[in-house]
Image (cartoon, rainbow, N blue to C red):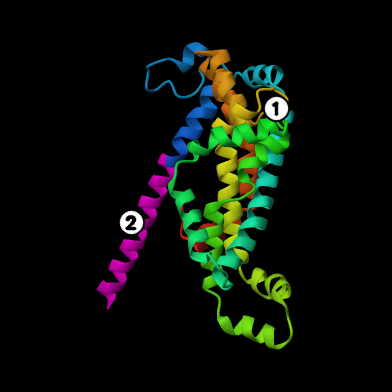
Amino acid sequence: MEGSIARQRMNKILTHIVLIIMSFIMLVPFAWMILTALKTNQESISVNPFYILPHNGWHWENFATVWKSYNFLILYKNTLLMIFWRVVCACLTATMAGYAFGRLKFPGKSFLFSLVLIQMMVPAQIFIIPQYLMVSNMGMLNSMFGLVFPGLVTAFGTYLLKTGYEGLPKDLEEAAMIDGCNIGQRFTRIMMPLTRSSMVSLGIFTAVFAFKDLMWPMIVCTNATTTTLSAGLAKMQGQYGSEYPTMMAAATLAVLPMVIIYVIFQKQFVEGIATSGGKL
């Protein structure tokens, strides 16, 4: 008995040690990015493996240089607004489509859902030209609507919410029907609140994918006042060339919004990922 308890304790200790080591390994790129942002260019390109900390002082002026060159307040605003509207649109359209595919019966249901699955299998880059032509013909280039347009509907969200609705017991909906609830009341008052975890998961994935989206903002928003952090950072790389401290300072400023969002909604992030069984 004592030997079994000792083995369990040792396995627990070894598990924690491995997890701590892996955590440090994952944090190394972020630490290297921040430390590089505080170095001179000569220090940043040094091949000395022990040249980790700045030797000639902490050069905070790298952040000031980037901040003056690009208006990060506008980039922050555009990025956060794009994330907000994409999350709202994705959750709204996906929960309605997921309820229809998961709980209702209508002609062509299987065929239409197969189209949703096909869209998930096809690379997203295929839709860029048609989406650009649609936004251009509507005169919405260099606008917030143009940034949000690809996220108005989501095949992944429809599939995720359909799975969530199918997992709910039928007795709840049948009881609501007996009480006289119509389809809209059953959806808004009974079924939709029970899929909160699936919607949180969808919101998390949508927010992360929107934050990382690079190609679409660079194509649809060529104006510096309407672009996002990812596109702005890509343009900075070409502007500063091999000025690695300045580039790392820009990268540090670019990741701040997502870090703050994660700190605020840490509990929802963990619950959403655990519920969906997915990974970012």
Q: Mark 1 — residue?
A: 72
Q: Mark 2 — residue?
A: 14
Q: Residue 34 occupies which quadrant of the picture?
A: top right
Q: As drawn, is 29 to the left or to the right of 165? A: left
As helix, strand or loop, the secondary structure at mark 2 comes to: helix
Principal secondary structure, stretch drawn in magenta: helix
Q: Residue 196 occupies which quadrant of the picture?
A: bottom right
Pick the front one: 35 or 68:
68
Pick the front one: 219 or 59:
219
Q: Is residue 185 above or below residue 178?
A: above
Pick the front one: 200 or 54:
200
Specify the amino acid type for callout 2.
Leu
Q: As drawn, is 48 to the left or to the right of 260? A: left
* Rendered location of residue 144, percent (x, y): 72, 36
Pick the front one: 12 or 166:
166
* Rendered location of residue 178, percent (x, y): 69, 88
